[in-house]
Image (tube, rainbow, N blue to C red):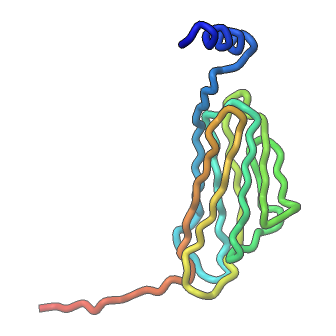
């Protein structure tokens, strides 16, 4: 490091700059079922841990799901479902306690397909996080004959 750069670096560090270090938190998203059929209710759970900052989670449900009004809940923080199917959560996780967010949606398609639902988490000073839960809906079952000798 050059002498002029080291002076700038020292001043920046003394002013509170952390050196641009970005840390990683953890998140996980799960669905209550791996398979579903038309009109089934799927409950999604998002857990966020290892973040000690003001944090935001967003999840826009795909068109093949209908949000169950009033089902959004969290162990801490502020929930917003007024713009459903766009669901929002925000909270101050400074204590590092983590949060669990749950919400439900109804399958509204009758064709066989996989539904991928992704949630995104952001917090200042942390890498952005995203995780998905996949549910196969209206799948077909294949039964093979049993052959005996």
What residue do we see at 55% from left, 84% from top?
A: 112
Q: Which quadrant does the N terminus fall into?
A: top right
Q: Is residue 44 left or right of residue 75?
A: left
Q: Is residue 135 visible?
A: yes
Q: Is residue 106 visible?
A: no
Q: Quadrant of residue 87?
A: bottom right
What residue do we see at 58% from left, 54% from top?
A: 131
Whole-percent x and y of residue 109?
66, 83
- In the picture shown, does residue 34 fall above or below 47? below
Q: Which quadrant does the C terminus fall into?
A: bottom left
Q: Quadrant of residue 62?
A: bottom right
Closest to the observer, 44 or 128: 128
Closest to the observer, 121 or 27: 121
The residue lying furthest to the right in this view is 82
- In the picture shown, does residue 148 fall above or below 59? below
What residue do we see at 83% from left, 62% from top?
A: 70
């Amino acid at each position: 490091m050059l002498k002029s750069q080291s002076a700038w670096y020292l001043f920046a560090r003394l002013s509170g700059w952390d050196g641009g270090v970005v840390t990683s938190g953890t998140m996980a998203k799960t669905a209550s079922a791996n398979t579903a059929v038309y009109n089934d209710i799927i409950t999604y759970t998002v857990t966020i841990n290892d973040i000690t900052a003001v944090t935001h989670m967003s999840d826009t449900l795909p068109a093949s799901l209908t949000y169950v009004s009033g089902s959004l809940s969290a162990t801490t923080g502020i929930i917003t479902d007024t713009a459903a199917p766009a669901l929002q959560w925000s909270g101050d996780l400074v204590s590092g306690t983590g949060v669990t967010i749950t919400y439900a949606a109804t399958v509204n398609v009758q064709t066989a397909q996989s539904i991928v639902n992704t949630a995104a988490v952001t917090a200042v000073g942390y890498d952005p996080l995203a995780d998905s839960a996949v549910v196969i809906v209206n799948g077909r079952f294949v039964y093979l004959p049993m052959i005996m000798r």
